[in-house]
């Protein structure tokens, strides 16, 4: 299942095995072996794959069929990569503030 999903994700964005290998700092042969499931990536590489394709490990392993599982009501995911510590603290402050306001109403 993993190999099929990886191959489909790669082809969906028109990448060759060599292109994906360059992006993930792997050889074309490694990508081919992952897709044919004759070799399996280490944990660090799995994380790189998930981040690059923006999918969960559950999706890659065939445990779920949705690339991104639905969020529970009232939950949100925000990509804060690249935010400064000050910006992150502002996001935290705003979140706490909105919760406090809503709890008081």
Image: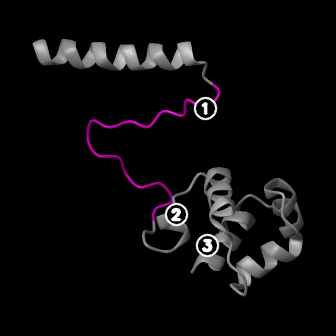
Q: Residue at the spot x=55%, y=29% of the render?
A: 80
The CA distance from mark 3 to mark 2 is 11 Å
Q: Count neighbours of disc 1 (C-alpha within 10 A) and say few if under 14, some if 14 to 19, many if 20 or more.
A: few
Closer to the eye: label 3 or 2: 2
Label disc, if present, on residue 57 of the rendered structure: 2
> With respect to residue 29, does 85 lie above or below?
above
Query: Residue 11 occupies which quadrant of the picture?
Result: bottom right
Earlier-in-chain disc, 3 versus 1: 3
> With respect to residue 37, does 65 lie above or below?
above
Q: Position of residue 15 (x, y in %)?
A: 81, 61
Q: Evaluate whether residue 105 shows in this view.
A: no
Q: Residue at the spot x=52%, y=73% of the render?
A: 61
Query: Residue 10 occupies which quadrant of the picture?
Result: bottom right
Earlier-in-chain disc, 3 versus 2: 3
Q: In the structure shown, which secondary structural element does the residue marked by tag 3 occupy?
A: helix
Magenta-colored stretch includes residue 34: no
Residue indicated by mark 1: 81
Residue indicated by mark 3: 5
Could you tell me which quadrant the N terminus lies in?
bottom right
User: Tags 3 and 1 in contact by the CB under 8 Å rule?
Assistant: no
């Amino acid at each position: 299942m993993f190999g099929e999903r990886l191959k489909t994700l790669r082809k969906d964005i028109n990448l060759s095995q060599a292109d994906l290998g360059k992006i993930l700092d792997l050889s074309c042969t490694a990508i081919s072996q992952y897709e044919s499931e004759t070799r399996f990536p280490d944990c660090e590489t799995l994380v790189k794959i998930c981040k690059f394709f923006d999918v969960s490990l559950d999706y890659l392993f065939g445990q779920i069929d949705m690339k991104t599982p639905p969020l529970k009501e009232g939950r949100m995911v925000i990509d804060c990569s690249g935010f400064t510590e000050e910006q992150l603290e502002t996001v935290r402050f705003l979140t706490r503030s909105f919760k406090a306001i809503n709890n008081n109403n």
